[in-house]
Amino acid sequence: MSRKLNRIPTFFIQDDWHDQMLKDTDFLIPGLVDHFLIINRSLPVAIIPTDFHMSCCKWDNPTRLMNITSEYLHIRGMHFQSWKYFARMRNELIGYLKKPTNLYENLPKSNDASFITCVHIRRTDFLTSGFHVPDRSFIISAMKFVEENERKRKNYSLNMTTVFFGDDLEYIKNLFNETYVLNGEKKDLDSWWFVSKDDPTDSILYSRHHCDVVLITAPHSTFGWWLGFLSKGNQVYYTDIKYVNDVSIAGLGLVVDDYYPPHWTPFKYDEYDNSTIIETLK
């Protein structure tokens, strides 16, 4: 946005919360922070904020700010999580990420002989907040759908391994006993999957270097979104939020085309077969 508006991006350290926000960002993506002018003081009272992007996931066109000629433009909004703000900057943003120091010794590595599918499951606070949380049957069916698609897209003989990320490790571990059949072959999940216990920073960095595909099960998970956006393979599947009971669209004003990049693949249950996952048309 600062490039489009020909302004210098500035961050005021107004309190301890802003200070911690800056430290967290600098720890994960230091190259991005290097572009900001950092001012260790509160925002001057003479600077009047301009409301912009006041709802979570609805793009607000920055061109409407060009007519503001004040020396300082302080925008007041939330999240700014729309791919449209940085549509052609993905590779640049990835380049700003720090180099991982975690060797991920307990997780598989992506290479020419190993294809990694990363599945993100968010539950905890979503269970009582109105955001959709899929059940285990849907998750397993979605995994089958993704594997089938990727084997067609890449190679049927791919050595595919799954890594789970999420905020409810016990729930994820309880999926160990699940199985599904693909092309006549029974798949036992406990024989080819792993559970990440890393913190959010290391999880993002793992995705950057090892997630060939990302499956987002809870469609409004912002962390799952970034896990997919910054992933190695840039191949993302997600539960189509239009076909589930989620407060985001009606209650929060989420605009699907603003939130999800157009090359990501949405999916849902087939309306005629409530056990088969199909890709939905955009």
Image: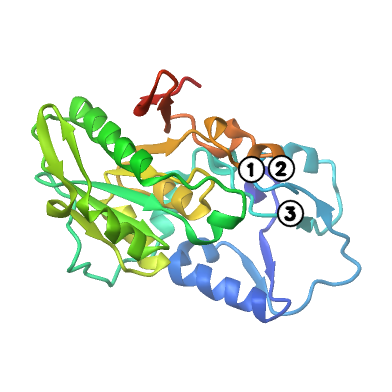
Mark 3 Cα-neighbour bin, 10 Å: few <14, some 14–19, many ≥20 = some
> Could you say where residue 59 lies in the image, as x and y percent from the top left?
67, 39
Q: Quadrant of residue 204?
A: bottom left
Tell me, yes or no, whether the two marked residues, 2 and 1, touch with CB atoms within 8 Å.
yes
In the rendered structure, the answer to whether residue 25 lies left or right of residue 279 reads right
Horizontal and vertical percent position of residue 246:
59, 41
Kindly identify which residue carries mark 3: 77
Say which element carries label 1. helix
Q: Nearer the viewer, mark 3 or mark 1?
A: 1
Examine the rendered structure and indicate whether residue 55 appears above or below residue 10: above
Image position, residue 273 (x, y; %): 37, 22
Q: Residue at position x 64%, y 43% from top?
A: 247
Q: State which tag comes first along the sequence, 2 or 3.
A: 3
Q: Secondary structure at mark 3?
A: loop
**C-alpha span from label 3 to label 1:** 17 Å
Q: Using the image as rendered, state which of residue 15 and residue 39 is in the foreground.
A: 15
Q: Which mark is residue 233?
A: none
Could you tell me the amino acid type at mark 1?
A: Ser
- Per the image, the residue denoted by label 1 is 248
- Label 2 and label 3: CA atoms lie apart by 17 Å
Q: Nearer the viewer, residue 22 or 63?
A: 22
Q: Residue at x 46, y 64 (%)?
A: 29
Q: Who comes first in sequence, dot 3 or dot 1?
A: 3
Q: Residue at x 27, y 71 (%)?
A: 102
Q: CA distance from mark 2 to mark 1?
A: 5 Å
User: In the rendered image, is residue 234 in sight?
Assistant: no
The three-letter code of the residue at mark 2 reads Gly
Q: Residues within 10 Å of mark 2 (few under 14, many from 20)?
A: few
User: Against 119, is 253 above or below?
Assistant: above
**Mark sitting on residue 251:** 2
Query: In the rendered view, does 104 fall on the left or right side of 6?
Result: left
